[in-house]
Amino acid sequence: MWDARWEQVRRDLYGPETQGNAVCVVPSDFGHVEATSFVGREPELAAGGDLLERCRLVTLVGVGGVGKTRLAKRIVREVAERFADGTYCAELADLGSDHAVAEAIASAVGVVAGARQDPLSALAGALRGRSVLLLLDNCEHVLDGCVRTVRDLLALLPKLRILATSRQPLDIGAEHVLQVRPLGLPTLVNGRLHETGAADESPVTSPAMTLFMDRAEAAAPGFRRTEANLHTVARLCQRLDGLPLALEIAARRLRTLTVDELLERLDHRFRLLGPGGGDRTAHPRHQALRALFDWSYELCTEAERTAWQQLSLCSGGALLTDAEQLCGHAEEGEDPDAGTTDDAFEALAGLVDKSLLTSVETDGRTRLHMLETVRAYGQERLAESGRAQLALRRHRAWYLNLAAQAGIAYGSPEQAEWLRRLRAEHPNLRQIVTAPPPTGEPAEAVLRASLGFWLHCLTSANVGEGAYWMRTILERHPHPPSPATTVTWCQAAWVAGFLLLLHGDHNSTHEVISRSEQVLADMPATSGTADPSAHWATSAELTSAFLQLRSLAALVTGDTATAARHANSALATGRWSAPLLTQQQCIAQLGFAAVLQGERTRSTSLLEQALAMSEAQGNTWHRCYLLWALAVDHGEAGQPKIALQLLHRALQHTRKIDEHLGEAALSETLAWVLSSHGDAHSAAVLLGAVDRVWHPSGTPRLFGFALLTAHRERGLENARRSLGEIEYTRAYQEGRRLGLRHALEKAIRDSEHSHQGADPATAHRDDSRTEQGTQGWADGYAP
């Protein structure tokens, strides 16, 4: 009875002729109703459908738990009508052998091979001439078997289309890979959801938050979305990388925990998101987060596992070239044949293929990123491996040395490149400086690295954090650890004093300077250092640096007499070639003191002298601030056209190094100049935009310079008076919504109509020799 009915089904579908000894069954049904909501993935759905229209083999590739299977089945449902002879799903997760792949696919299609017939031949015979879509789910652990079977099926069946899911590509010539990323995450600013600025709009959410909220409301009946828990959910989604499986397991834990408690426990995510929170109907590998990554780990080679462990220490990712060095070279005491950069490259490429690393191109270079959950698993495996201390020392040594190299390059033509380099490594540096150093690490390593912190933290708008770093370092090393490290310690102390000064902590600045001067008093006048990164050789040269810092501290408070005295003393001590603020900075400070004193001829001459020195050096950053000082000088003299051109040139330089605080300072002065000469609206827009920059940076507005703060107040009052309170508030809020870069672009373009550039005869020279006026600057600056 059953056999007769089955034969009739076969005849209805495929006609009266059998294909060899195979038996075919009705196509699989992908039209069932899903038990839970499908969230997001619109771009992937569209791309998957388009690829299946054009390509015979499409592989969805992504890390475990990212939702490849769910997405694949939704794609199949949406394209099913294109395949007249049906769609089939072969689930390969439980296969234990590559040789079982063809048989598993045949079984899924309903083909039973004869006693002496190969499953692949039976399958090909059954599907010959048919328009079929075949889904192969979870190919990664039987990759070789999948490759052989898929290659042969595509060659034998011209009408066949295959959609596969895997943690790494099949690497067959016909394959088109569609990368499946985690769900989109919310934008957080200082740990809170980014507000739109409009009173009638809620904070922006994301697909990851939508999924978590939906699953939480289903799993924990008492849970509801509220304004109070929205920001906590956003942080939780960030910590879990937007991984759908992790979010779904976490949502079930809300039966026991509050959202805040759940977030607090994520440092132990693999215990928290264990089998107790999983879906009982899911495959065992998908019932717990650890099981998911255990599976990925087992699929890795030994070299890939070692690289995973090493790179799990990297916060914020790593350049490919850095990762090769971290993972490829043996340290002292290791087996010299333990690894090479060639071996490391292959291991890293394997981790990229297995979706455990993501490769992103930035400025023409490859940067590798690892999800936080993948990092956490790698760190647990590293702790179990017995090589955690070795890996930690290697990580710290590499990035501390990078910072030291950057410090040496400051003041040179390579300055801009090194600033961009350290900007990307800020998370790695933060992790290193704030953590206790491992046993045996020489104190000099972090002291040398400090040389790279002062300008990096300033240009990246991390002054407050940089001041904290240097406090931490000097608390650990309140005095030179040894006579040989005196020079290096004094460099670090100068960096600490500089960042503390810009942070607004003047008392600590003077305490650090005084302590350093006492160290120098005990240092032989001709003593040197064996450290090649310490470019200063004598106590006199070091003393000059601290005199320059005392001058700057006095200048900030408006004490011009003291500032000039210390700057002249520093210059009298002699020339020096430190990679910190050097000779031209003392000249610049004398020039700015003259600005404050109203000595126009002297101020302009000194500032132009310092600018010429910086241009000859190739010092991009210092030119920004010297052009700014000259703009203030000309603004004070009632010469707005020249002031505007100088500000435009300075802003071009800030963009070369992405200098956030310099951009903010220049914008404040630009607002003052514009408001003083009839463009109150642009000034108000700029003032609103720049307000979003200062507070997070950890430095007082305009670095606390009394004169510049007075300029800002005058510009603000001018704009208010010209526009009226209502119009001023509207323009100010417009600036806050735009953000500084876009507000600057708008202000420059609006000012073009009234300020077309200075007379070329009076314009200051630029190292690029391009005096393009206001219009030329706007063209070059617009993002």
Image (spheres, rainbow, N blue to C red):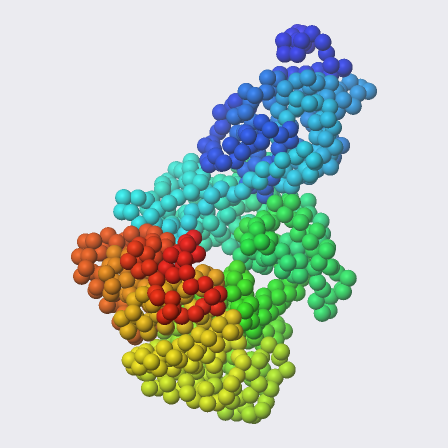
Q: Residue at x 41, y 76 (%)?
A: 608
Apparent side of residue 322 relative to residue 194 in the rendered image (left or right): right
User: Would residue 589 be seen by someone viewing this image from the given angle?
Assistant: no
Residue 159 image point, x, y percent: 66, 22
Apparent side of residue 605 relative to residue 290 in the rendered image (left or right): left
Residue 702 image point, x, y percent: 34, 69
Residue 731 image point, x, y percent: 26, 54
Q: Is residue 553 above or below residue 268?
A: below
The residue lying toward the viewer, choosing from 358 and 755, is: 755
Q: Quadrant of the N terminus?
A: top right
Apparent side of residue 385 relative to residue 412 in the rendered image (left or right): right
Residue 635: name its quadrant: bottom left
Q: Residue at x 66, y 12 (%)?
A: 14
* Residue at the outermost right position: 116
Residue 189: name its quadrant: bottom left
Q: Residue at x 36, y 72 (%)?
A: 630
User: Would residue 172 be seen by someone viewing this image from the given angle?
Assistant: yes
Residue 7: name its quadrant: top right
Q: Is residue 649 above or below residue 157?
A: below
